[in-house]
Image (cartoon, rainbow, N blue to C red):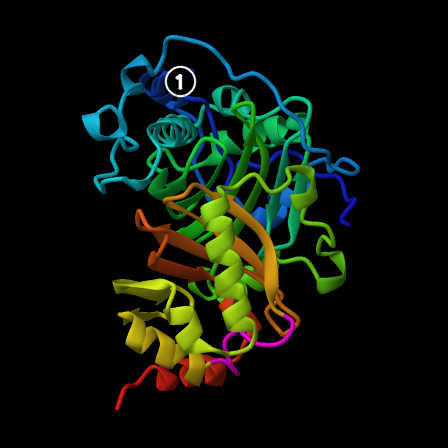
Amino acid sequence: MLRTPLARVARGGTLVAQAGDGAANPAECDAEDNGKTSGAVSRRGILRGVAVGGGAVAAAALLPTGAAYADDRGPAGGGTVRQVPGVHTVIDTSHATDEAARIFSAYFRTKSAKDYEGISTFFSKQNANYLDAILGWPFYGWQAIHDLFAQYMPQWPKDGTSSPVRILGDATSVVVFFTNTTGLFGPSEMHAAGVVNFQRGKIARWVDYWDGRHFGTDNLDAERLSADQFPTDWMESTVGETASPVIRKVSAQLSAALLVGEGERAAALFTSDAVFEDMTAHLQILGPRSIGAYLTAASDVLPYAGKGTRVRHVVGSARGGGYEWAAAGPVPRGLHALELDAQGRITRLTAVWDGTLVDDETLMTMARRAIEH
């Protein structure tokens, strides 16, 4: 595991505040940011500035209190969950509990306001684990995270934002899709999915997944750690398996079908109008018949199918979440985000993994296998 000195990480995948608890007022933070230097921040530069502690242990802590964001409290569908100022996309909270929706609304507004003190209160002071599954960067400890935000947030572009796109799960564990605009963590925008576990309302574990090809292979190569420096422990044991039994069962069944390349067996877990999308391969497949045919035809090239694939960790509620998968092939890890209906069937699956770990021909083969006859 990496032991170089690091400072704190305002990474595109961190988060949290508990429902009913506050964060700093974005308007006040924006005012404080006036006149501060903006500019792109290198993730490698961040890594070099952060102090990495020893082994991380999941812990719990109480959430911050306060009146700011009082207007963000209330039912998710009641107009009280607000997007980051300046971002006009609607947050998809259809598969999130009200509390989870409020948490992420408050968190990303605080983050986009560049309020590093406010963001720091969302993390457990006893322990906070953040790992980037694509770059291999591990960050352990509240102080390291706080110091990182304090060092780099003032350098972010004034109009830079980090905003939630889709939230799946509850206040115990979540998959959250979010977008970082250009300049926050390099010369490209980032579209990522964070896997988050809470303990007593605080972040206990967060792992980010995204496609390095979208970020740019040259940009990625300049920041990614060498394979021998990647973490060997992704800290899932520190939080345990607290996801809903429903999504844990679906995840196990889907992984078992993919392990043996039985696409039709996997497709039986999907609804008649289900959507299967692979963000990295730029594929979208509709309906269980086509999904099953594709998973069977492409089983020999899909990184999340075949011998050596398994479930690493499951998060979420009975309506949504997902599972991190591990594999023995060239792509050792990734994420399947899942949306479920009231009967526990999959209505939408989104696969996220690092496309730089396979060649162009592999991606073209995936696309060809999706062609129907």
Q: In this view, does 143 lie to the left or right of 70?
A: right
Task: Please tell me which residue lies in front, 349 or 91.
Answer: 349
Q: Position of residue 76 (x, y in %)?
A: 27, 29
Q: Hey, which quadrant is residue 199 in on the image?
A: top right
Position of the C terminus by quadrant: bottom left
Is residue 302 located in the magenta-colored stretch of the structure?
yes
Q: Position of residue 260 (x, y in %)?
A: 55, 77
Is residue 149 located in the magenta-colored stretch of the structure?
no
Residue drawn at point x = 72 percent, y = 35 percent = 51
Mark 1, Cα crowd under 10 Å, few <14 / some 14-19 / many 20+, is few
The dominant secondary structure in magenta is loop
Q: In this view, does 342 lie to the left or right of 259?
A: left
Range covered by the magenta-colored residues: 299-308
Q: Is residue 178 above or below residue 328?
A: above
Q: In this view, does 166 lie to the left or right of 296?
A: left
- Mark 1, residue position: 32
Residue drawn at point x = 69 percent, y = 43 percent = 237
Q: Hey, which quadrant is residue 292 in on the image?
A: bottom left
Q: In this view, does 69 lie above or below 178?
A: above
Q: Position of residue 7 (x, y in %)?
A: 66, 34
Residue placed furthest toward the front: 343
Q: Is residue 273 left or right of residue 229?
A: left
Q: Where is residue 106 in the image (x, y as percent from the top left)?
A: 38, 25
Residue placed furthest toward the bottom: 373
Q: Is residue 364 above or below residue 12?
A: below
Q: In this view, does 259 lie above or below 124?
A: below
Residue drawn at point x = 40 percent, y = 23 percent = 33
Which SS class for mark 1? helix
Is residue 75 visible to the viewer in this orientation of the structure? yes
Q: Hey, which quadrant is residue 204 in on the image?
A: top right
The type of residue carrying mark 1 is: Glu
Is residue 178 visible to the viewer in this orientation of the structure? no
